[in-house]
Image (cartoon, grey):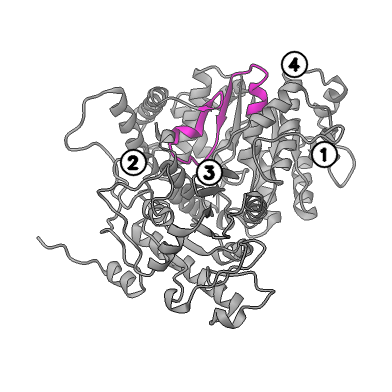
Amino acid sequence: MKRQKTSWEGGFKKRGYHPPVSPSLLVAGGRSENPEPWTAASRFQDAIRTLNTLQTNASYLEQVKRERGDPQAQLEAMTRFLERSGLKAEDLDQLNIIHVTGTKGKGSACAFTERILRNYGLKTGFYSSPHLVQVRERIRINGQPISKELFSKHFWQVYNRLEETKDSDHSAMPAYFRFLTIMAFHVFLQEKVDLAIVEVGIGGAYDCTNIIRKPVVCGVSSLGIDHTSILGDTVEKIAWQKGGIFKPGVPAFTVPQPERPLDVLRERAEKSPCPLYLCPELDAFEEDGKPLQLGLAGDHQRSNATLALQLARTWLGRQGYLDISELKDLWLSSELPAKRTPPLAPAFKPGKAMMQGLQATVWLGRTQVLHHGPVTWYIDGAHTTSSVQACVRWFRKAALNEEKPADGSEVRVLLFNVTGDRDTAALLKLLLPCQFDYAIFCPNFTEVSTVGNADQQNFNVTLENVLTRCLQNQSHWNRLMEAKVGQDPWLSASPEVEGVGGWLKQAPLHGPPLFVPPSARPLNSNSLVFPCVLQALQWITQGRDPHFQPPASRGLHPHPAASSGAVLLQEASAIRVLVTGSLHLVGGVLKLLDPSLSE
């Protein structure tokens, strides 16, 4: 029977988008009609498919928005789910938790902290979100994602227990993130970790991780604007949410913040009450002008590192692993200094274990550089205004430090996507100084149909939804380009113009100017939309990335307006690709560039 053309296909084609393959909507997971034998591998895959039948993050956010009139109900529901799974809130006290929130950098701060404490011979648990390639990444023991066998074991224990405790009053199953949070607590308790580092999902006060009653220490990384429909539309409102993780008598640390949100954090600490301290700059920990070596690149990681030093030292001191007697009475006191600004936490000389921990920290998808022959990948999951600004500073510095091709034929490519309620136009405007020759937009789907790739399935969005967003992003970018150089770029070729979209490449960043005749470059051909990450990478690499060879059977499907761009990419001595805007996009790219991450 002939397939009928859907209405959205015609609409996209009218707007100049032609999918190289026939797109299809994602379908829900579950058992196949011909189930495979109940092996360890199939047991794990069945666990992932079953997990995906719960609400994923996109749907969870919508639920939170609907319930925000009574957010306390979310924590109460989480407590009931925890109890139905066989645990009580007081059981979590045994985990010796470090609880960390913030808008940007909280994952990196947690990663630094975990690596430091592991250097002391401690068995660490680490719960974070989102995952990049496999959902197992969210629950780590000693820095490594739990095995498929361990994931399956604990998943089915928790899931079956929740199924068994359904009744007329408690018929629901927890949402995706809530379920994984409960499962993480089960894993850490069953595997008897010495401590658990728990990263807040969204906000703090009403985040489901905030059923934690007695953490050992709390941390707040840099604050900014994000998730405004849930947390509020000002940084002060967001700070109020973040400060909601403070607990009576539990030391809390934050990095330098703008004055007004810092006031809100101080007020939250006073109400708790708990001692709140500002972390000094990392310079204060460095002696003799020797900078501490960090495993994560970028100047913005220095504040995450200083937060990690304070969190690690405080945990070690409160648990009796270090002697901090001169601070113990102060930190265990519920009395706060009578100051408007939180006092500065004292700096100290980091020991060898701390310095080595900072240097050995690895956190995929954050300021990560991969050299693949002539193609260099710069990967950072920045998705807020402040984090994109930090990403731009890092990328420009990292790209300028690379050896320039003798012939000056360097091409810069942006691969971008966003999710949620973020202001795409504002984020893209921040990326203009990077002087990209091409801007590529695609959804976070690794392939158009992700059946069989259950870790990255999302049943709450359709291909039509995400492609519409990508076309809007492309439109924003094109308008920014036109505003920068005018409708005719040749009329704007003045010395102060640094170059846009491959029409004009100007020294010093790109070497000698390279002009491309207008006839060879269709209008807006420097911004392209692809239906998935795979096809975007196929076009960007043109077979020149030795780590990423498109399957011969699929061939390369050139974009209808991109043939001249393909020629430039094939001939360039260096291709520098920045992947940013979404951690989910970063995960899709890493999955294709490094297949070992899927093993």
- For label 2, the residue is 453
- For label 3, the residue is 371
Q: Indicate which disc, 1 or 2, sits on the residue closer to the N terminus.
A: 1
Q: Nearer the viewer, mark 4 or mark 1?
A: 1
Q: What kind of element bears circle 3?
A: strand
Measured as percent of width and height from the top left, residue 50 is found at 33, 36
Q: Indicate which disc, 2 or 4, sits on the residue closer to the N terminus.
A: 4
- For label 1, the residue is 283
Q: What kind of element bears circle 4?
A: loop
Q: CA distance from mark 2 to mark 3?
A: 26 Å
Measured as percent of width and height from the top left, residue 367 is found at 60, 45
Q: Would you say the residues marked 1 and 3 are in contact, meaning their CB atoms lie under 8 Å apart?
A: no
Residue 52 lies left or right of residue 127; in this view the side is left
Give me the residue at 76% from left, 32% from top.
Answer: 310
> The residue under label 4 is which amino acid type?
Gly
Question: Is residue 306 highlighted in magenta?
Answer: no
Q: Depth check: give the residue in front, 417 or 81.
A: 417
Give the extent of the magenta segment.
Answer: 115-144
Mark 3 surroundings: few (<14), some (14-19) or many (≥20) residues within 10 A = few
Q: Would you say the residues marked 4 and 1 are in contact, meaning their CB atoms lie under 8 Å apart?
A: no
Mark 4 surroundings: few (<14), some (14-19) or many (≥20) residues within 10 A = few
- Residue farthest toward the front in the current orientation of the protein: 406
Q: What kind of element bears circle 1?
A: helix
Mark 1 surroundings: few (<14), some (14-19) or many (≥20) residues within 10 A = some
Residue 14 lies left or right of residue 261; in this view the side is left
Q: CA distance from mark 4 to mark 1?
A: 27 Å
Q: Indicate which disc, 1 or 3, sits on the residue closer to the N terminus.
A: 1
> The residue under label 1 is which amino acid type?
Asp
Q: Would you say the residues marked 1 and 2 are in contact, meaning their CB atoms lie under 8 Å apart?
A: no
- For label 4, the residue is 320
